[in-house]
Image (cartoon, grey):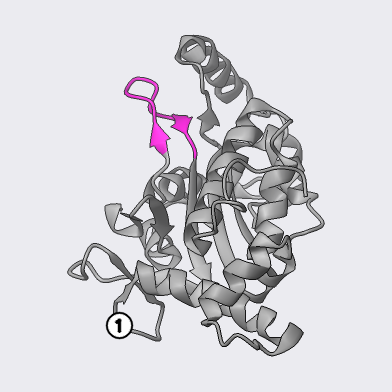
């Protein structure tokens, strides 16, 4: 399962093809747990190893194409699934900046003959962040609670959001919980034991029965979403979560850090996310 995650120069990458392969063959009720682990989500130690300790924010693709790699690829590279050999992550950064520069090029047709990267940086320093719509990314957030997922699901700036069906699925029949405070683990464990004892077995339940049954689990149940949007879209999503729940603020900061690092934004543009 370690094959599905890779860290390069402060950036976290996830291979969704590898993550999907990691859960192939698992019973439906174990697939969420297996997927979270394959994507690098950290769990508490036994006997509380069904509880998530920390979520993950990772880059899953760029320009609509998924990241992937082979086990023996250089550690500072990723691939575009089904398309290319290993690509240095630094090349991805240059490509993103050049896309922004190409967008800025059409304003005055570059009378000073700057490079595309320089054009993009100049536009950003002047406040024209719209050039970041020229490049798009796909970001995985995994291990967060259902309690804050609503904030992500209602973001109008995203191009697309893929999420786990909340209740109407066997995948939610025994979900892990996200428990940030280790002191609450005994209480959380007791709550889960009680729910499991009181609920009938999920096997054979109709979709309507599953929907009612799975809704009884706490809002702390761990989830997973895939966000797709332009770099500018994702910056706005990050900015929108800063002043809300601490959990959402933490996810927003990590999302902002990834987009800033991938774009290698000028100092005047990077830093903590602010309201758009």
The quadrant in which residue 194 appears is: top right
Give neighbour class at mark 1: few <14, some 14-19, many 20+ (Cα, 10 Å). Answer: some
Q: Is residue 204 visible?
A: yes
* Residue at figure coordinates x 62%, y 83% from the top left: 102
The quadrant in which residue 221 appears is: top right
* Residue at figure coordinates x 54%, y 16% from the top left: 188
Q: Which residues are magenta?
A: 42-55
Residue 222: image location, x then y, percent: 57, 37
Residue 51: image location, x then y, percent: 46, 28
Residue 276: image location, x then y, percent: 78, 50
Residue picked out by circle 1: 85
Q: Residue 66 or 224: which is nearer the viewer? A: 66
The quadrant in which residue 174 appears is: top right
Does residue 45 belong to the magenta stretch?
yes
63, above or below 239, in the image: below
What element does badge 1 sit on?
A: loop
């Amino acid at each position: 399962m370690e094959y599905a995650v890779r860290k390069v120069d402060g950036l976290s990458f996830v291979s969704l093809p590898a993550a999907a392969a990691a859960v192939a063959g698992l019973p439906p009720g174990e697939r969420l747990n297996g997927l979270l682990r394959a994507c690098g989500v950290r769990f508490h130690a036994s006997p509380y190893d069904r509880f998530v300790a920390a979520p993950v924010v990772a880059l899953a693709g760029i320009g609509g194409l998924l990241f992937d790699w082979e086990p023996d690829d250089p550690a500072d590279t990723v691939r575009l699934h089904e398309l290319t050999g290993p690509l240095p992550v630094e090349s991805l950064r240059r490509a993103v900046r050049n896309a922004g520069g190409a967008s800025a090029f059409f304003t005055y047709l570059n009378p000073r003959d700057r490079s595309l990267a320089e054009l993009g940086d100049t536009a950003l320093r002047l406040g024209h962040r719209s050039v970041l719509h020229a490049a798009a990314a796909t970001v995985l957030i995994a291990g967060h609670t259902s309690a804050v997922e609503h904030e992500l699901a209602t973001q109008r700036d995203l191009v697309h959001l893929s999420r786990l069906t909340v209740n109407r699925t066997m995948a939610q029949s025994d979900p892990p919980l996200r428990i940030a405070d280790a002191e609450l683990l005994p209480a959380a464990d007791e709550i889960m034991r009680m729910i499991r004892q009181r609920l009938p077995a999920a096997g054979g339940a109709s979709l309507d029965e599953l929907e009612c049954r799975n809704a009884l689990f706490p809002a702390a149940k761990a989830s997973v979403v895939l966000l797709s949007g332009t770099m500018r879209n994702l910056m706005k999503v990050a900015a929108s979560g800063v002043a809300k729940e601490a959990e959402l603020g933490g996810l927003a900061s990590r999302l902002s850090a990834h987009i800033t690092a991938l774009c290698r934004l000028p100092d005047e543009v990077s830093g903590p996310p602010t309201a758009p």
